[in-house]
Image (cartoon, helix red, strand yellow):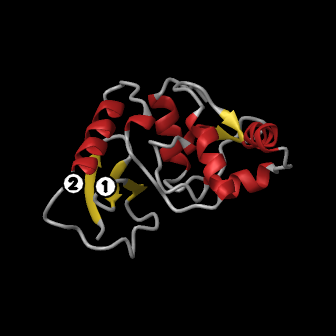
Amino acid sequence: MEYRIAIETDLVGTLVLTSDGALLTGCRFAGDSCEGLGTARDVEPPVLSQARSWIARYLVGEMPDPRELPFAAPSTRFQGLVREAMLEIPYGHTSTYGAIARWIEERTGRRASARAVGGAAGRNPIAIIVPCHRVVGADGSLTGFGGGIQTKVRLLAHEGIGL
């Protein structure tokens, strides 16, 4: 069974949180692959209440730890590694696709490309919480983002990252 709730925010518009009832399975921008997510249920499981609270704390400028939320999202091993790397990027900082590729190489001994990292980051179903918005191009340029480049700019500015 899938549960979902929508949260209205001033910063990024509507976010849709999804859960299987035990784990957070998604945090997406409304209109960003939200179709086919299932139907909203009358009951909000505790994990969605926790995620709602996490988002509220983030929006008022706190720096909640993403790992305090129990989440799981289907992924390949590589996508999971990219998510792990994104979770290592501190608030107020950015990393590059190339740096994440090197991070993966160091841990696995297998070559990774910045392009592959970009593809995996683009499939991150838990936006904001798993901070794919903190990943930029090698020259600091902003590249594709599920919520749109302007949303990425707003999230980075919210975290004090000047562009």
- Whether residue 133 is situated above or below residue 75 in the rendered picture: above
In primary-sequence order, the first of circles 2 and 1 is: 1
Q: Please tell me which residue is depicted at 14% across the width and 60% down the height of the picture.
A: 43
Could you tell me the amino acid type at mark 2?
A: Pro
Q: The C terminus is located in which quarter?
A: top right
Q: Please tell me which residue is depicted at 41% across the width and 65% down the height of the picture.
A: 31
Mark 2–mark 1 distance (CA, rounded to whole Å): 7 Å
**Location of residue 15 in the rendering, given as x and y in whole percent from the top left corner:** 34, 53
Towards the viewer: 95 or 163: 95
Could you tell me the amino acid type at mark 1?
A: Ala
**Location of residue 60 in the rendering, given as x and y in whole percent from the top left corner:** 31, 28
> Counting other residues with Cα less than 10 Å from the Cα at mark 1, is it few (<14), some (14-19), or many (20 or more)?
some
Towards the viewer: 50 or 63: 50
- Residue under label 1, please give it: 22
The mark closer to the camera, 2 or 1, is 1
Decide if residue 2 is on the left or right side of residue 140. left
Evaluate if marks 2 and 1 touch, with contact meaning CB atoms under 8 Å apart. yes
Disc 1 secondary structure class: loop
- Residue 129: quarter of image: top left
**Location of residue 19 in the rendering, given as x and y in whole percent from the top left corner:** 33, 59
> Counting other residues with Cα less than 10 Å from the Cα at mark 2, is it few (<14), some (14-19), or many (20 or more)?
some
Q: The N terminus is located in which quarter?
A: bottom left
- Whether residue 139 is situated above or below residue 91 in the rendered picture: below
- Residue under label 2, please give it: 45
